Image: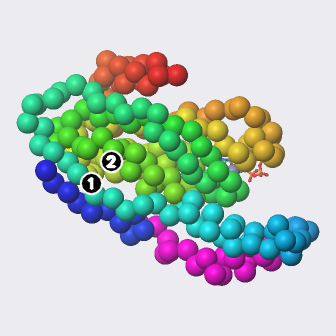
């Protein structure tokens, strides 16, 4: 077994300053005409600051890999991993599911780590296309598999609660690398296995 401790904050912005965020939230609400001095809303700026800080803070984890002693050479697909992210244009949530697959090389990855990696890249201001690519690239870099595939399906609240108000619209993005990109049969197998989960 090999583990590598991952500190997601190493690759993103510093830890949120919730005191400054609370003061800013109070001003933000005032500017929007929301009274934050009622018994029910007195604590609201602080709650807002903590809520956004939490949505921008991925948890640390250890990247545990094992030798592929059995020489497993078929696809491994972990489906329906929850995705909770913030669109960088409106700072409103987009949520859905990620389906991550890989064709192992010399090492296999602890299954829970796929969800950890998705969270690491989701808990920051994002666009869905970049999130999808970052998960694939990170697995490629840290696992050196024969191929990686990532499909994310998400609904964007900036598109449903406001603006276009297209409630129920679902965006599907795909990132493929290695043999999952170059081998048509593997690519089709991966895409049909994740499409079949719907
Ligand atoms: N490609 C992509 N676009 C996104 C994502 N999240 C949000 N958007 C889009 O970002 C765009 C921002 O467009 P703007 O015209 O600057 O913003 P807006 O005036 O609020 O646009 P509307 O949402 O159409 O009202 C919108 O079309 C959003 O739907 C994402 O993950 N990927
Ligand atoms: Zn948006």
Residue at mark 2? 113
Pointers 2 and 1 in contact (C-beta within 8 Å): yes
Number of numbered discs:
2
Quadrant hosting residue 79: top left
First in sequence: mark 2 vs mark 1: 1
Residue 109, placed above or below residue 184: below
Residue drawn at x 37%, y 62% is 60
Location of residue 78 in the rendering, given as x and y in whole percent from the top left corner: 37, 34
Q: Nearer the viewer, residue 18 or 136?
A: 18
Left or right relative to 157: residue 111: left
Q: Is residue 19 magenta?
A: yes
Location of residue 112 in the rendering, given as x and y in whole percent from the top left corner: 33, 44
Residue 64 makes an appearance in the image: yes
Quadrant hosting residue 149: top left
Sort mark 2 into few (<14), some (14-19) or many (20+) by Cα contacts within 10 Å. some
Left or right relative to 46: residue 180: left
Q: Is residue 123 magenta?
A: no
Secondary structure under tag 1 reads: strand
- Looking at the rendering, the stretch of residues picked out in magenta corresponds to 11-28
Q: Which mark is residue 120?
A: none
Residue at mark 1? 63
Give the color scheme: rainbow, by chain, secondary structure or one colour.
rainbow
Residue drawn at x 31%, y 18% is 185
- C-alpha span from label 2 to label 1: 6 Å
Q: Residue furthest right?
A: 33
């Amino acid at each position: 077994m090999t583990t590598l401790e991952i500190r997601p904050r190493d690759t993103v912005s510093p830890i949120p300053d919730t005191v400054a965020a609370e003061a800013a939230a109070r001003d933000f609400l005032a500017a929007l005409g929301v009274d934050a001095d009622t018994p029910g809303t007195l604590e609201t700026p602080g709650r807002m600051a903590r809520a956004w800080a939490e949505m921008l803070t991925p948890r640390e984890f250890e990247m545990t890999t094992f030798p592929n002693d059995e020489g497993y050479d078929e696809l491994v697909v972990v489906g329906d991993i929850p995705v909770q992210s913030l669109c960088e244009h409106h700072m409103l949530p987009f949520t859905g599911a990620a389906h991550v697959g890989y064709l192992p090389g010399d090492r296999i990855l602890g299954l829970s780590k796929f969800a950890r990696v998705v969270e690491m890249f989701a808990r920051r201001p994002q666009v869905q296309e970049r999130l999808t690519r970052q998960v694939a690239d990170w697995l490629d870099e840290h696992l050196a598999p024969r191929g990686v595939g990532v499909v994310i399906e998400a609904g964007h609240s900036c598109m449903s609660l406001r603006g276009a108000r297209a409630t129920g619209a679902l965006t599907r993005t795909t990132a493929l690398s290695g043999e999952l990109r170059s081998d048509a049969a593997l690519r089709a197998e991966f895409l049909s296995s994740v499409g079949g989960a719907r």
